[in-house]
Amino acid sequence: MPFQVTIKPSGHQFQMEAGETLLESAAREGFTLRHSCRNGACGSCKGKILEGQVDYGQYQANALSESEKQAGMALFCTATPLSDVMIECKEVGAARDIPIKTMPCRVQTMLRLAPDVMELHLKLPANERLEFLAGQYIDILLKDGKRRSFSLANAPNDDAFLQLHVRHVPGGLFTDTVFGQMEEKTILRFDGPHGSFYLRDDSDKPILFMAGGTGFAPIKSMLEQAFQTHSKRQMVLYWGAHSLKDLYMGQLAGQWQETHPNFTFIPVLSEPQPEDHWPGRTGLVHQAILDDFDTLEGFQVYACGAPQMVEAGRSAFLARGLPEEAFFADAFTFSPG
């Protein structure tokens, strides 16, 4: 028996299908809810259950506390209804207006950006284009029905090829293939776009971008869109990596700084190697932001990287005066299977 879901305050309603989470079913019906990691690790999709019962699913304890559950909160990426439910959350309107497509594509180019980072250029069928918002992601569809999510690194109006930055996860079903057997001309299938992490253009507030590793990919898309539209907003990119080789497009970000007066690039290495001869900032990337700004009250922050980095940044930035609605995030998690 399907259950009905009502979203407040919008009043939108839809029917659940068996086995779907609240997030999945809402997306299927065209309602995009704020989310990031999609597996209970980051807390971005947290919302309130106003009426009804849910199975909370599997999630990490730091993403949803017992006190929050007692207050009616749940993670919509893991929660499945046990009855009709009414939920309270903020919907993402702009993303809902873009159709989700399932399409084939051909691997046009493979470029090794770092020892463990591969850039894939995906060619769509003739006369096909993928409409998306800067910062969104696609799901690569594997033959066994599993999915692997990758952010689009190209700006929406530079869509001759879809660009992905794939980090090698040893033992990873898809990334082992990319770094071991995949060749150019390989045919893949994907669906998308997905996600509520996209550049908002309805504000003139200065932006702080915080990237960790390949979390640079969606931020690259956002920045290139901002440059292409001649945005006058002040923008600073803090890109955190272990060592110099992990700043796999640092030269590009440096070029942006030279050509765009409203953009600043600050790389931060947590474990610089002796051969790096690193003269720049060191430590944790979110701490570098805190060191540079006494208050974040008048800013927007876009953060993408490991869940630990995203959550550490979120907690610290809110304590430094950043409004909660001004923090946008996508937390990367890696699936070895």
Image: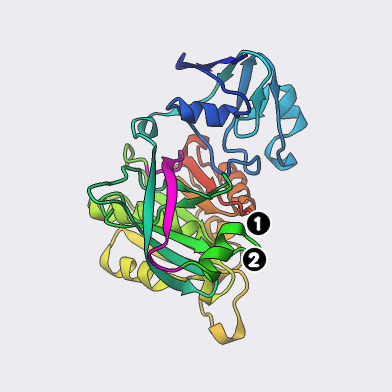
> Tag count in the figure?
2
* Amino acid at pointer 1: Pro
Q: Position of residue 63 (x, y in %)?
A: 68, 39
- From the image, which quarter does the N terminus lie in? top right
* SS of the residue under disc 1: loop
Q: Is residue 190 magenta?
A: yes
Sequence order check, earlier mark of 1 and 2? 2
Q: Nearer the viewer, residue 298 or 243?
A: 243
- How many angstroms separate mark 1 from mark 2 (CA)? 7 Å
What segment carries the magenta color? 183-199
The residue sitting at 59% across, 16% down in the picture is: 2
Q: Which residue is mark 1?
A: 336
Q: Is residue 12 above or below residue 324?
A: above
Q: Position of residue 237 (x, y in %)?
A: 43, 59
* Quadrant (top left, top right, bottom left, bottom right) of the C terminus: bottom right
Amino acid type of the residue that numbered disc 2 sits on in the rendered structure? Pro
Numbered tag placed on residue 170 in the rendering: 2
Contact (CB < 8 A) between labels 1 and 2?
Answer: yes
Looking at the image, which is closer to me, 234 or 82?
Answer: 82
Q: Position of residue 215 (x, y in %)?
A: 50, 57
User: What is the quadrant of residue 133 in the picture?
Assistant: top left
